[in-house]
Image (spheres, grey):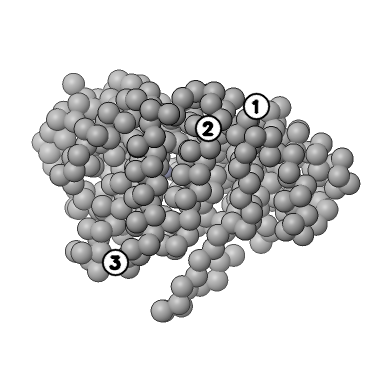
Amino acid sequence: MIPPREENSKWMQLPRDIVIGHGVIKEVTSVCDDLKLGNDPLIVTGKHTRNIAGDVVHDILADAGADPSVITIKSATTEEVERVKQAALYNNSNYLLGVGSGKSIDVAKLAAAELDLPFISVPTAASHDGIVSSRASIHDGKRVTSVEVNAPMAVIADTEIIANAPYRLLAAGCADIISNYTAVSDWELAYRLRNEPFSEYAAALSRMTAKIVLDSVDSIKPKLESSVRIVVKALVSSGVAMSIAGSSRPASGSEHMFSHALDMVAPKPALHGEQCGVGTIMMMYLHGGDWERITNGLKKLHAPTTAAELGIEDKYILEALLLAHTIRPERYTILGSGLTPEAAERVAKITKIIE
Ligand SMILES: [Zn+2]
């Protein structure tokens, strides 16, 4: 686990090997050898992603003489984390590989942290920054909580596999990165008003990452490995910004709190990144920034920019706006002590999120 941070000391945890490119899944053995992780990995994968990559990773490791085990998980819940931990103990696993989109990686990451075992991230989609970060999102029966764990020892991002994942996931990943803009503005506000610890390096890196993605929207297209490369590099860079900050501050502010609130109130929430993108438009308006630039960028990516496109009724958007500031009360943002119902309706209407 991460050692406690002492006053005036700085603890930064980063992945050691990051491999991005066409067909790099084949390099899983060299990465594991480089890290000297042992001979008994546990592969944590999803039902669908097992066919795409889980079994491939198994066969590559087995052909190289390792003795891998595989466990298929259904959801990112504490029960599944427990099941993975039992499997790892039963198989005497030396390390865990999360092979999948969001869920498998979150579950493997948390199980590895609780067992104090190394963890390797093998994403099959680039839909959010969890593929690189030291945080895991887990449903504990009541709500989704974000837990601080270890950063992955390595990230193996095969652009061929990720380019074949549904484009909607990649667009959501872009929206998650674009949300760094308002996250950093919230962080600056908390620094100015509350004297919260602030890192110029982390803030600058996070903002630059969002800018690169927003400036690249015209070249991000379905099925293109060059697009995947842009997004994965941005997710890595965003994860590094969080490592430098020692918190998720550079990549998670009021727009993320809005998305978490939507997860709680909406009967059928949209993807994390999609909700964060819509949140970014509204929070950018509250910051007095250029929210239309965010809307236009998301539109070019074909990411949702309205409640209707999220598939969520207007009333839940307003409910989430009123609830958002309570999600992480210790995290000061532009939402302050909360919006009034009139102010919530105004921001949602002006930014054309609701009709
Ligand atoms: Zn996010």
Front in this rendered view, residue 309 or 290: 290
Q: Position of residue 196 (x, y in %)?
A: 29, 66
**Residue 340 at what x, y percent from top left?**
13, 42
* 3D distance between C-alphas at marks 1 and 2: 24 Å
Q: Which of 355 and 11 is in front in this view?
A: 11
| Other-residue count near label 3 (Cα within 10 Å), few / some / many at <14 / 14–19 / ≥20 | some
Assign a secondary structure to mark 3.
loop
Q: Of all residues shown, which one is farthest toward the left?
A: 342
Q: At 45% from the left edge and 36% from the top edge, which residue is drawn? A: 173
Q: Say which label, 2 or 3, has the lower sequence index.
A: 3
The circle drawn on residue 245 is: none
Residue at figure coordinates x 19%, y 31% from the top left: 351
Residue at image mark 3: 196
Cα gap from disc 2 to disc 3, whole angstroms: 38 Å
Q: Which amino acid does label 1 sit on?
A: His
Ligand 1 positioned in quadrant: top left
Q: In which image quadrant can residue 38 be found?
A: bottom right
The residue to which callout 2 is attached is 226
Image quadrant occupied by the N terminus: bottom right
Amino acid carrying label 3: it is Glu
Q: Can residue 192 be seen in this view?
A: yes
Q: Name the residue under label 1.
A: 48
